[in-house]
Amino acid sequence: MRVIRVIAMLAVLGLLFVASAAASAGGAPTATTGTATSIGASGATLNGTVDPNKQSTTYSFQYGPTTAYGKTTPVTTVAGNAGKSVSAAITGLAPMTVYHFRVTATNASGQAMGQDVRFTTTAVGTPPPAAKNAVGIGAVPGTVTYGRSAVLSGAVTGPKSGGVQVILKAQPYPFTAAFKATGAVTTSASSGRYSFTVAPRVRTRYEVLAKTPPPVTSRAITVGVRYAVGFFVSSTAVHRGARVRFSGSVRPSANGRTVLIQRRSSTGVYRTVARALLHATTSKIRSSYSTRLRIRSTGIYRVRMPAHTPYAAGNSRSRRISVR
């Protein structure tokens, strides 16, 4: 009996260890390609930002005269839970030639590839231009559920990177107005890193202005917004042929449109089995739906709100209805 108890205790401790390890584990890295600096006739310095996401992560730069790249810088390792400014010097380039490059990062949870960036080498005998500041920007996630937030982050690079005021600007859909300051302002860390948290109510473009001497502006990125779909059923265990009420809400409001009631097939694909009309509620940002469906067999259901400009399609959580 004592042996059995010891084994049981070891099993419990093992489960706690696994749970603790899972809780502290990170995820896949993120990678943002920066700008090339110190560009000469035969060489340049490639820059970027890598967030290891709490795991040991390797990174390198791919470069070449086309987006097929063809050459890679030596692999380097970074770690931590925040974005790291990374760079690599390359040589052996042809003068007066356009080159493409991007940063790539890999850890145990996955791989990330930065966007493609171009630069042009100078003519032979041309002195390298003076280093200039630049600022990058990225979004995680790229699409948020209505009411939730995303983190915009990047780094100021160049002669003046730390202690720089960074101003966030936005351009909501339909993107006809100019970018306007959101009122969000921060200061870059000594590494040049900065971040903002945003909760867009509609698909929105963002850019940042870094007050370096002279000021520089990032490229524009878009954060999408998907519908938030709530889903309830009147019962999760019924007799065969019973009618179950499916109800819930959609944010933002989409009065007059329809939601799709879907059932998961044996292959894991959700198929539409009914539709429900969205009605106005006392809230200006919420519509509701309600319909009844006859249940003949056990199944897993969800509600899907199709995409409508400027919102992406949204799915509710799944619910299992069992037939006794």
Image (spheres, helix red, strand yellow):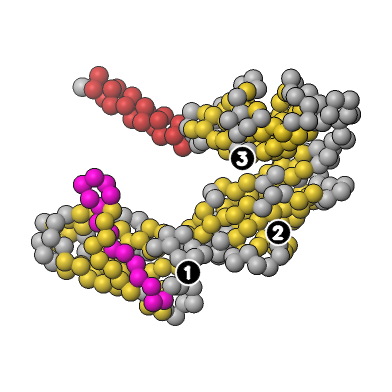
Check whether the beta carbons of the residues at disc 1 and disc 3 lie within 8 A of each other: no
For the N terminus, which image quadrant?
top left
User: Which of pointers 2 and 3 lies earlier in the amino acid sequence?
Assistant: 3
Check whether the beta carbons of the residues at disc 2 and disc 3 lie within 8 A of each other: no
Q: Give the residue at x 85% y 25%.
A: 124
Q: Circle 3 sits on which residue?
A: 115
Real-space Cα separation, disc 1 to disc 3, in angstroms: 32 Å
Real-space Cα separation, disc 1 to disc 2, in angstroms: 23 Å
Q: Which stretch appears magenta?
A: 255-269
Q: Give the residue at x 23% y 62%.
A: 273
What crowding class fits label 1: few (fewer than 14 Cα within 10 Å), some (14-19), or many (20 or more)? many
State which mark lies toward you, 2 or 3: 3
Q: Give the residue at x 56% y 47%.
A: 140
**Left or right relative to 215: residue 1:** left
Can residue 228 be seen at all in this image of the molecule? no
Q: Quadrant of residue 117?
A: top right
What type is the residue that disc 2 sits on? Lys
What type is the residue that disc 1 sits on? Pro
Secondary structure found at label 3: loop
Q: Circle 1 sits on which residue?
A: 252
- Picture coordinates of residue 10, whole percent (x, y): 33, 24
What type is the residue that disc 3 sits on? Gln
Based on the picture, tell me whether residue 84 belongs to the magenta stretch: no
User: Which of pointers 1 and 3 lies earlier in the amino acid sequence?
Assistant: 3
Can residue 22 be seen at all in this image of the molecule? yes
What crowding class fits label 2: few (fewer than 14 Cα within 10 Å), some (14-19), or many (20 or more)? many
**Left or right relative to 56: residue 298:** left
Q: Above or below — where is 157 with respect to 307?
A: above
Q: Give the residue at x 55% y 64%.
A: 202
User: Which of pointers 1 and 2 lies earlier in the amino acid sequence?
Assistant: 2
Name the mark on residue 169. 2
